[in-house]
Image (cartoon, coloured by chain):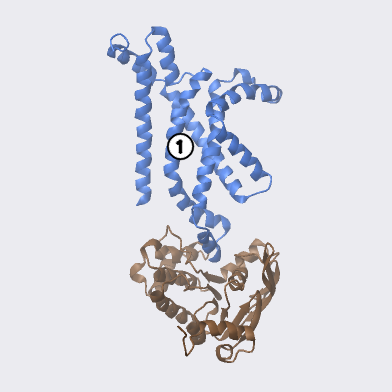
Chain colours: A blue, B brown
């Protein structure tokens, strides 16, 4: 490898890069939290088959699943200030052009997760045989009681492994944000590379960080799955 | 007393129930017979609103309820005084046998955990499954699951239990144990409406047999009247196919 890779330079850049992992975690945390809440609404509303709302959600899900996340981020980043800019300026006195780019990235991922997780949740809910819902009704439980006590606990178990995979996916997708000027671990690796003229060390460091946290997240979900299986 | 008047129900263009009226007295055991597609299961499901009838009146507990326009409160009220035993058991898969029986007692009847446990254990003892109380449905045979289903229904002390082909999903060897339990329910004096294909059971247990076909009640009467002196040609035809004949042509 010679000049291309030096272990000293790797040791030098690694701490600088890993200190930016908080940016990735910030994105993952807020996107998953709000994305999950959105997804619950999407799943439940879709299952209720309400006219018009059902169709709108169908289009929304097709759009989110049919376009790359990077494109959605671009649209959010450049589109939201143009469409809602004057509205926010007049109503709240907020200049959307001055808001940190990471907010738009998070909006894009939240909307994206609302669709993907929404479908995961919907599938998990429908995986619980309907006869159990009927049985709940037949013993006099209300719709809400039946849903929370009978359907949800079982749907939860079905959804957890998919949710874990999705979470790891979101963590890795946060690497896209550097294209919008958000300095996460990959962004940091790139800037350090440009500043020092040695790019590979930074990217290897980023790789190590991505792998480590991905495996940790995956491991955590395997533990949760095991716990739930008992 | 539970009475249904003029129940009608269609699925799309398919008319499943065309004006069915049935009256069941307190403590009476009524068996509904009929070929597949005669509407008997749909009729049963309309009684506790698992299916919403297109029209009809339910007279129950001194109240008159419009089957089509019933409000949530009224539906809940009917369901809380009736119980349903499903063809495919309908046990809660994530709960043990005991928890299945307790669920309605604690969540609907708001009994304390200790009291609910006592009632549920008694119910399981009564169906001969107390040693299986901590088993999950997937660990039980079909017959055992159905007996838990019956225990769950009986434990709620409903005024009426509706049985929807309770033995149709069971393999022949397990039918007996389940029918035995249902016979015991009948002896308790709970009003029962049973949809079944078990003729000898109907003959033994029923106070009255109703024969349905094509979405109407064709004939009703005492078991021996229906089985041995049916008035209607359609009843005779149906029975001749399922009651074992003296001679077989092989």
Judging depth in this view, the residue of A187 and A33 nearest the camera is A187
Helix, strand or loop for disc 1? helix
For the point 54% across and 78% down, which residue is it? B192
The percent position of residue A181, horizontal first and vertical second, equals: 51, 17
Q: Quadrant of residue B1?
A: bottom right
Looking at the rendered image, the quarter that the C terminus of chain B falls into is bottom left
**In the image, is B104 to the left or to the right of A61?**
left
From this viewpoint, which residue is outermost toward the front? B250
Judging depth in this view, the residue of B177 and B188 nearest the camera is B177
**In the image, is A208 to the left or to the right of A106?**
left
For the point 57% across and 79% down, which residue is it? B33
Judging depth in this view, the residue of B240 and B194 nearest the camera is B240
Residue A78, above or below B142: above
Number of numbered markers = 1
The percent position of residue A7, horizontal first and vertical second, equals: 28, 14
Category of crowding for the residue at label 1, using alpha-carbon neighbours closer than 10 angstroms: few (below 14), some (14–19), many (at least 20): some
Determine if residue A101 is in view: yes
Q: Quadrant of residue A96?
A: top right
Determine if residue B64 is in view: no
Residue A148, above or below A116: below
Residue A191, above or below B185: above
The percent position of residue B224, horizontal first and vertical second, equals: 55, 91
Q: Quadrant of residue B21?
A: bottom right
Judging depth in this view, the residue of A157 and B238 nearest the camera is B238
Q: Which residue is mark 1?
A: A166
Q: Chain of mark 1?
A: A
**In the image, is B157 to the left or to the right of B217?**
left
The percent position of residue A10, horizontal first and vertical second, equals: 32, 15
């Amino acid at each position: 490898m010679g000049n291309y890779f030096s272990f000293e330079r790797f040791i030098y850049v690694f701490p600088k890069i890993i200190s930016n992992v908080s940016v990735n975690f910030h994105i993952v945390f807020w996107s998953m939290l709000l994305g999950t809440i959105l997804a619950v609404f999407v799943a439940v509303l879709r299952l209720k088959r309400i006219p018009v709302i059902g169709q709108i959600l169908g289009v929304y899900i097709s759009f989110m699943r049919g376009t790359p996340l990077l494109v959605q981020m671009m649209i959010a980043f450049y589109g939201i200030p143009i469409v809602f800019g004057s509205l926010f300026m007049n109503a709240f006195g907020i200049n959307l052009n001055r808001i940190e780019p990471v907010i738009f990235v998070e909006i894009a991922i939240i909307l994206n997760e609302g669709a993907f997780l929404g479908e995961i949740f919907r599938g998990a809910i429908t995986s619980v045989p309907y006869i159990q819902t009927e049985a709940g009704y037949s013993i006099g439980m209300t719709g809400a009681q039946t849903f929370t006590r009978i359907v949800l606990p079982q749907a939860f178990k079905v959804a957890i492994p998919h949710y874990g995979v999705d979470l790891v996916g979101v963590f890795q997708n946060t690497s896209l944000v550097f294209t919008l000027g958000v300095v996460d671990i990959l962004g940091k690796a790139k800037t350090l590379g440009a500043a020092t003229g040695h790019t590979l060390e930074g990217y290897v460091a980023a790789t190590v960080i991505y792998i480590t946290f991905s495996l940790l997240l995956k491991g955590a979900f395997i533990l949760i799955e095991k716990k739930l299986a008992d | 007393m539970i009475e249904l008047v003029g129940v009608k129900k269609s699925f799309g263009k398919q008319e499943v129930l065309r004006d069915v009226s049935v009256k069941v007295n307190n403590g009476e055991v009524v068996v509904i017979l009929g070929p597949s597609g005669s509407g008997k299961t749909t009729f049963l499901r309309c009684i506790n609103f698992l299916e919403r009838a297109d029209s009809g009146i339910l007279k129950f507990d001194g109240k008159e309820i419009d089957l089509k326009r019933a409000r949530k409160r009224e539906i809940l009220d009917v369901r809380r005084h009736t119980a349903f035993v499903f063809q495919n058991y309908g046990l809660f898969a994530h709960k043990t046998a005991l928890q299945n029986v307790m669920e309605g007692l604690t969540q609907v009847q708001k009994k304390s955990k200790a009291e609910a446990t006592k009632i549920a254990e008694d119910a399981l003892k009564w169906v001969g499954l107390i040693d299986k109380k901590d088993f999950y449905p997937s660990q039980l045979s079909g017959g055992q699951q159905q007996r838990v289903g019956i225990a769950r229904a009986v434990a709620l002390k409903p005024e009426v239990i509706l049985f929807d082909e309770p033995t149709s999903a069971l393999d022949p060897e397990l039918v007996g144990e389940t029918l035995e339990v249902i016979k015991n329910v009948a002896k308790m004096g709970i009003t029962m409406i049973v949809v079944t294909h078990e003729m000898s059971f109907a003959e033994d247990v029923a106070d009255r047999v109703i024969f349905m076909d094509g979405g109407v009640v064709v004939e009703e009467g005492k078991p021996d009247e229906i089985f041995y002196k049916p008035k209607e040609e359609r009843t005779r035809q149906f029975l001749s196919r399922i009651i074992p004949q003296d001679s077989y042509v092989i």
